[in-house]
Each structure stands twice: as structure tokens, then as C-alpha cells.
Image (tube, rainbow, N blue to C red):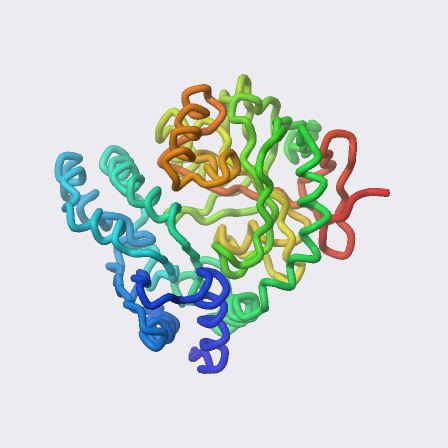
């Protein structure tokens, strides 16, 4: 499989000129990914240098899921003490970059699956400070098609690449018109109610959460490509009820599907999965924050015709909703979370329990299209329905 250069240039152009807001001569742009994603990384690098800035190429080892501070080897053969000895230059590298492009796509996803529980958890926690540095920069992630990921989807590489490339070369700015009405209604609303059905018991479930005074974010390619969602972070204390999440998600080499969650006082008190239960347990038992909710969102990209397991794709499908286990988005609570005043305000909201912090942020997706587990969604007393593959306000 070879992606034609024109498509790669369009793709890289969206990442450089739109997602991270262009290039200034003083920029240091980290471009991170495995060697297998080099065709796209290389064109991004050329564009950065052509603009007079510096490209910092961060090549990721094949056993390292998304370029964490360490790969799987240290979790399998080392200790927690070794994992915590992250070199100081690693922090300096992240602090010195001004913009960040991550090209996901693994040659052999199996290399970083099935890690020992204790060291695997320590690896996730050791990476958290650097994830938080990245989130305060101009950043974007995208997905390069690989045979390893195509196999996980049960597709040929050509068919998989066609889905990925067509979605990633679509102009994300065209999503603005689709997302405006949903964003405006969320901004006017205080509560989200999500109704789902459990397929095994037939029980109707409802999950409620407060989004009053939250910042509502439209996603049109600024941080993800492809894109297509309107999201916010709820008051982490307010989440109550039950939900069934039906679409599959691929996380840390494991496919998880058929997730049931019960919340009381903002905390997950019961959970199960029809497939990948141990993977779900590992996520939820990571830390105190991984038992809470960090995001609620509507998927708005009707152009993604095939539901892929990868979170970057499945959460964007028009007519879906997703919630995220773990970390809140600070920008949903304060206008400038990178400023000293913004950090101070976010810290105060965290102490009150309104903002959630965790080493995890795992999106799980409910399908409200025909045949899905989703039943009804309300923003206060206004119902949203799926029509022609996307959300619209009923009536």
C-alpha cells in the first residue's frame, strides 16, 4: 500500500496550516511517530523547515504505545523504580517545543499489549506529566494506516487505508456548520441526560451530569484529524446513573466492547464489559480520577462511513456520543489553562472536585444510529435525534 504524494501533502497541509495554526520562524515543532508513519512525518518535516522553523523528529520505538516515556520492554523486564527515573532531558525536550504533531500508527500493536499490572500502571503514571505539557501547547494527533492496525479492524490494508486517508484529507473546517447548533444548545444547557438500553437485560438506563457554565468546544481539526465532535467536561461530582456503551474501542492493544458503568456521587461504583473486561478494569483501577468522568461529547462527522475501533475514528462518527473515563479538559473550565491565573483557578476547581485529574482519558462510544444501544438524549428539556447520519435538535 502506497499513499499518493498529493494526498499526503493535503493531509500534512491540514495538520500544519490549520491544526497547529501555521508555522512561525521561532517554532520548534515536535513530530512524533513510528518509522512506519514516515511518509507523512517526512512531508510535515519538510513544511516546517521550509517555513524557517525547526522540526524535532521524535521517532518512537515499535514497542512503545504512542511514544510514552518508555516502551514495553522496561515494563516487562524492569522495575517501578527504573520507570520513575525519566531523564531530565525528556522533560526539557517537551517544554522546549512550541507545537506538537503526533502521527499514530503501529507496525506491530501486539508488542505493547499484555504488560504486567504494576509496572504497566507505573509507565502510564510516569508519562502523565509529559502528556500534560503537550496539552498546553498547540497540538494535533492523526492516524497513519498500517497493516497491524488494519488486521485489528479485520480489513485489508488497502480498504483500511482508503477509510483513513479519505477522512484525513477532508477539509475539517466544513464541520463548523454541522457543529454550530449543537454547540449553541449545549452552551445554553445545564444538564445532559443520556438514555441507553442494556442488550442482555433489556433494562433502560439513564446517565445524568451537570454542564452548567462549562466552556463548550467545537472540534474542526484543531487537535484531531480527522475530526468531528462537540465536547465539554462535566462537573465531575455531578455524574449519576447508569449507561451501556456499545461500540468497540481499541486501547493499549486491547479491544473493549459492551461496557456497563454505574455512577453514584460522581464515582464509578460498578463496571463490566462483554469483551475485554480485564482491559477495562486496568483503566478504571489506575488512580482515583479514573473512577470519574472527564468528558461528554457528540460525534458529528457523517463522512466517516465505517466505524473503526481506534478512538480517533469511532468517537467522531456522526450520530454517536462518547464519554471519557478519567482526565477532564481544563479548557472547559478556564479560558487559558496555561496561564498562571488559569492554573491557579483549575487547581482550586480540582480541590473542590469539579475538575477531574487522572493518568487516563479513555473515550468510550455509544451508537445512537439505528441498531445501536443509544435511545434518547436530552440537553435540559430539548431532545436531540439522529437524522441522515447526524445530530439535530428535535422539533
Query: In this image, 235 relative to 389: left or right?
Result: left
Name the quarter where the C terminus is drawn.
Answer: top right
Name the quarter where the N terminus is drawn.
Answer: bottom left
Task: Identify the residue at horizontal 44%, vertical 62% (top origin).
Answer: 143
On the image, the x and y values in percent for residue 116 come to: 25, 38
- Residue 65 in view: yes
On the image, the x and y values in percent for residue 304 come to: 61, 61
Residue ranking furthest to the right: 395
Residue closer to the observer: 145 or 155 = 145
Figure check: 68 above or below 210? below
On the image, the x and y values in percent for residue 65 come to: 32, 52
Task: Identify the residue at horizontal 44%, vertical 34% (top origin).
Answer: 326
Figure check: 236 above or below 8? above
Total marks drawn? 0
Query: In this image, 121 relative to 321: left or right?
Result: left
Residue ranking furthest to the bottom: 5
On the image, the x and y values in percent for residue 323 come to: 55, 38
Q: Which of the 4 quarters of the picture holds residue 340?
A: top left
- Residue 274 in view: no
Query: In this image, 115 relative to 219: left or right?
Result: left
Figure check: 15 above or below 78? below
Query: In this image, 111 relative to 321: left or right?
Result: left
Figure check: 45 above or below 290? below
Amino acid at each position: 500500500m502506497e499513499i499518493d504524494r498529493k494526498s499526503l501533502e493535503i493531509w500534512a497541509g491540514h495538520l500544519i496550516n490549520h491544526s497547529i495554526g501555521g508555522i512561525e520562524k521561532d517554532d520548534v515543532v515536535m513530530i512524533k511517530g513510528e518509522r512506519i508513519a514516515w511518509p507523512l512525518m517526512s512531508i510535515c518535516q519538510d513544511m516546517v523547515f521550509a517555513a524557517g522553523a525547526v522540526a524535532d523528529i521524535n521517532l518512537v520505538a515499535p514497542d512503545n504505545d504512542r511514544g510514552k516515556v518508555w516502551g514495553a520492554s522496561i515494563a516487562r523486564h524492569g522495575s517501578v523504580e527504573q520507570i520513575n527515573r525519566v531523564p531530565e532531558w525528556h522533560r526539557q525536550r517537551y517544554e522546549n517545543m512550541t507545537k506538537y504533531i503526533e502521527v499514530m500508527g503501529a507496525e506491530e500493536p501486539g508488542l505493547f499489549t499484555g504488560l504486567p499490572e504494576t509496572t504497566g500502571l507505573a509507565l502510564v503514571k510516569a508519562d502523565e506529566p509529559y502528556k500534560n505539557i503537550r496539552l498546553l501547547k498547540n497540538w494535533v494527533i492523526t492516524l497513519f494506516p498500517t497493516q497491524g492496525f488494519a488486521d485489528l479492524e479485520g480489513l485489508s490494508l488497502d480498504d483500511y487505508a482508503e477509510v483513513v486517508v479519505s477522512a484525513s484529507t477532508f477539509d475539517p473546517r466544513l464541520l463548523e456548520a454541522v457543529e454550530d447548533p449543537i454547540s449553541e444548545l449545549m452552551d445554553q444547557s445545564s444538564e445532559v441526560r443520556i438514555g441507553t438500553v442494556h442488550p442482555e437485560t433489556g433494562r433502560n438506563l439513564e446517565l445524568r451530569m451537570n454542564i452548567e457554565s462549562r466552556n463548550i468546544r467545537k472540534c474542526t481539526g484543531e487537535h484531531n484529524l480527522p475530526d468531528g465532535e462537540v465536547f465539554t467536561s462535566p462537573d465531575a461530582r455531578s455524574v449519576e446513573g447508569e449507561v451501556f456503551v456499545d461500540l468497540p474501542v481499541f486501547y493499549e492493544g486491547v479491544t473493549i466492547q459492551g461496557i456497563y458503568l454505574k455512577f453514584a456521587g460522581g464515582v464509578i461504583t460498578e463496571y463490566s464489559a462483554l469483551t475485554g473486561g480485564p482491559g477495562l478494569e486496568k483503566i478504571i483501577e489506575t488512580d482515583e480520577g479514573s473512577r470519574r468522568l472527564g468528558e461528554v461529547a457528540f460525534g458529528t462527522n457523517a463522512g466517516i462511513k465505517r466505524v473503526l475501533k481506534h478512538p480517533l475514528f469511532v468517537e467522531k462518527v456522526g450520530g454517536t456520543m462518547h464519554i471519557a473515563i478519567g482526565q477532564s479538559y481544563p479548557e472547559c473550565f478556564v479560558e487559558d489553562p496555561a496561564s498562571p491565573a488559569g492554573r491557579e483557578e483549575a487547581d482550586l476547581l480540582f480541590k473542590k472536585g469539579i475538575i477531574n485529574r487522572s493518568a487516563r482519558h479513555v473515550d468510550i462510544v455509544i451508537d445512537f444510529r439505528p441498531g445501536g444501544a443509544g435511545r434518547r438524549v436530552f440537553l435540559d428539556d430539548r431532545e436531540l435525534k439522529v437524522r441522515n447520519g447526524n445530530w439535530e435538535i428535535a422539533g
